[in-house]
Image: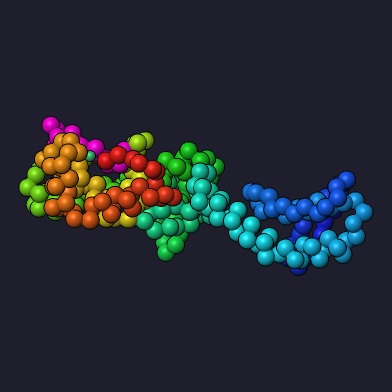
Amino acid sequence: MTSHLQLGDLTIDLVRKNIKHLYLRVLPPAGIVRISAPRRMDIETIRLFAISRLGWIEKQQEKIRLQARQNPGEYSDGESHFVWGGRYLLKVIETGGPPSVELRPGELLLHVRPGSGKEKRQAALDAWYRRQLEAAIPSLIARWEAVMGVKVSSFYVRRMKTRWGSCNPRRRSLRFNTELAKKPPRCLEYLVVHEMAHLIEPSHNARFKALMDRFLPDWKQVRKELNRTPLGHEAWEE
Ligand SMILES: [Zn+2]
């Protein structure tokens, strides 16, 4: 049998059971608080127990909320999404017209048609991330072409599962992962220099590392940042 216990703003589900002790749980995803209590225990004892655990309850609820925000799987309101290394709260706005994305301080506004599901929202956001990179990469390539003395003929931005980027030295063509738009800008610059260094040395040998040391002395530091969770994935390749 379930009843309720009110403590200020907090409503607690109270379940009476054939048990000897009190049990308190905070349940995901909504952070509902539930107390299981012996059938005959008086309500004042239960209330005092709940009051003594208020701090713990708040901490658990905060943890559950944080977990929900760090798991951007649904593309719904209140999720955290990263843009150039900054964290933004997603706000989904249903409007007519083509989908669009707007960046405000602390907020990422995603305009989609009413009834757009997770796939449509994700596609709209991915397309926007890709455009961010397509706008940022040409000037980086131009700057590093002058420094490194190589020439890039084309580049692409794609969703890739296991790589941050790749280089086809024969075609002088570079590829970059869409996810890079979520990382701090220096990570993108590192990837650009890395893939362009492959135009000089295709493999990751000592010569390649010497090139990286020369052009971007802190490249190892940036690479660590690139692969750091929760922003990214462990051990992706360049
Ligand atoms: Zn590489």
- Is residue 39 shown left or right of residue 141? right
Q: Residue at x 24, y 37 (%)?
A: 166
**Residue pushed farthest bottom?**
8
Q: Position of residue 145 (x, y in %)?
A: 11, 49
Q: Position of residue 181 (x, y in %)?
A: 33, 50
Q: Position of residue 230 (x, y in %)?
A: 44, 50
> Quick one: 36 or 172, which is closer to the camera?
36
**Residue pushed farthest right?**
40
Q: Residue at x 27, y 41 (%)?
A: 238
Eyeballing the image, is 2 above or below 45?
Answer: above
- Is residue 51 shown left or right of residue 107? right
Eyeballing the image, is 44 above or below 158?
Answer: below
- Is residue 109 shown left or right of residue 205? right
Q: Position of residue 100 (x, y in %)?
A: 41, 49
Query: Is residue 98 in view from this perspective?
Result: no
Q: Residue at x 68, y 50 (%)?
A: 27
**Residue pushed farthest top?**
170
Where ligand 1 lies, by image quadrant? top left
Image colouring: rainbow
Query: Is residue 121 in view from this perspective?
Result: yes
The reply to whether the magenta stretch includes residue 28 is no
Q: Residue at x 35, y 41 (%)?
A: 235
Eyeballing the image, is 63 above or below 238?
Answer: below
First to last magenta residue range = 163-176
- Is residue 14 shown left or right of residue 26? right
> Quick one: 138 or 146, which is closer to the camera?
146
The reply to whether the magenta stretch includes residue 170 is yes
* Number of disc labels: 0
